[in-house]
Image: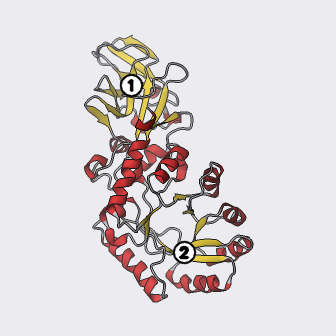
Amino acid sequence: MPYTQHTSGRPTWLEIDLDAVAHNFQRARAAVAPATGIYPVVKGDGYGLGVLPIARRLLAAGANGLCVATVEEASELRKEGITHPLILLSGLSAGVEESVAALGLQPFVFDPAQLAPLSQAARSRPLTLFLKVYTGMGRLGLLPEQLPEALRLLRTLPGIRLAGLVSHLACADQPEHPDNQRQIDTLRSLLTQYGLSQGQTSLANSGAILARPDSHFSWVRPGILLYGASPFFPANQAQQIGLQPVVSWYTRIVQLRSLPAGTAIGYGQTFVTQHPSLIAILPVGYADGYNRLLGNRAQVLLHGCRVPVIGRVSMDSIAIDVTGLPAVETGTLVTLLGRDGNEAITLEEMAAWRQTIPYEVITNLGKRVAKYPISAQSL
C-alpha cells in the first residue's frame, strides 16, 4: 500500500523507493571486485523517476560518481551541490566545450576532431576525458584505426588528459552471446596494442555487471538494475536476480457507472459490455505515460485483485471493469504498477503488455505525474 495518501489535486502519483535503489546498488557492488569503481547512470531524469533524490541516495550508498547524457543534466546536478565526478556518456555537441570545462565534466570523446575545441576550453581548467572506441555496438565511437590519431592529439594538445578507453556491449542482455567475448577481446587488444594500461577503462553496463565479470575492467556503469528491472528481460524478472522494485504507480477512481449489456467504452468502441457492468474511470492516460497499447490488454490492482483495463487508453483517462468487486467507490485506491496484497504488476509485465522494454516504461512517465521519493528513514 502507498505511503502517500492524496486527498486533493489530481490523484495520480508515483512513489520512488530510495531504499530499494540503495539495495540494488549494493547488488551491483557485490558483483564486482572491491577496487572496481561504480558510476551509476542517472541520465533521463534518473530514468524518469526524479534524478536528485536518486543521485543523492546513490552517492550516499558509495557511488564514486554519476553518469549523465547531456550537459544540461550535469548542470542540474552541479546546481544542487553535487561535486562528485560526472561522466558525460553521450559525447559532445559542437559548442558545449566551455560548459563541459566549467562544470568539470569528464566526457566520452568519439571523434578526434572534438579534441582541439576541448583543449581550447580547458586552457584555464584542465579536463580529463575518455576515448570511446567502437568494438561492435554500431553507435558512437572511434574506429580502431582512428585511435592512433586521437592518442597523438592528446599528447600534443594542452589542458586535456586521457583517463582511459571505454566502449559499450551490444548484447549484454544475452550473457552467452558470442559477440560479448569478441567485444571484450577487442578492447583488451586495443589497450595492449597502444601500450595503454587498463587505467580507467570501462565496458560493463547492468547485464555485464551481473553476468560477465571479465568485462568489468576498472569501473562499471549500472543503469536499469538500479531502478528495479532485470537487464536480462524477457529471460527473467528482477526478483529472480536479487533486485527490489523501485517504482509504484497509484491512482484513484474518479467516476463509477453501472452500464447495461451492449454499452461501448472509449474511442473507437473497441470494448462492448457483454452483461450489466460496473465501470470505473481512472484519471491517468497516455499523457502520463500510460501507453495507448495498454488498452484492452493491461490489468490494474484493486483490493489485491487483478482488474482489466477496457477500451482504448485516452490522453487523460482509462476505464476498468470492477463488476462484482466489493467496497468499490469514488476515491478507491488503484495500483497501476507495484504491489497490492499478494498481487504485483512489475515493470517487466507492463513492458510485455506494451511490447517494449522496462527502460521505456519508466522513462516515458509523464512530467505531470507527481513523484514522491520514499525512504524508511523518513517515515
Q: CA gap, disc 1 to disc 2?
A: 49 Å
Query: Could you tell me residue 148's position as x and y percent?
Result: 56, 86
Q: Is residue 39 above or below residue 347?
A: below
- Label 2: few (<14), some (14–19) or many (≥20) C-alpha neighbours in 10 Å: some
Q: Quadrant of residue 297?
A: top left
Picture colour scheme = secondary structure
Does the image show residue 357? no
Return the mark for residue 334.
Answer: 1
The amino acid beneath tag 1 is Val
Q: Residue at x 34, y 54 (%)?
A: 27
The residue carrying mark 2 is 163
Which of 91 and 6 lies nearest the eye of the viewer? 6
Of residues 376 and 354, the one nearer the viewer is 376
Q: Amino acid at mark 2?
A: Ala
* Image location (x, y in percent) of residue 4: 45, 27
- The residue that appears at 48% across and 51% down in the rendered structure is 60
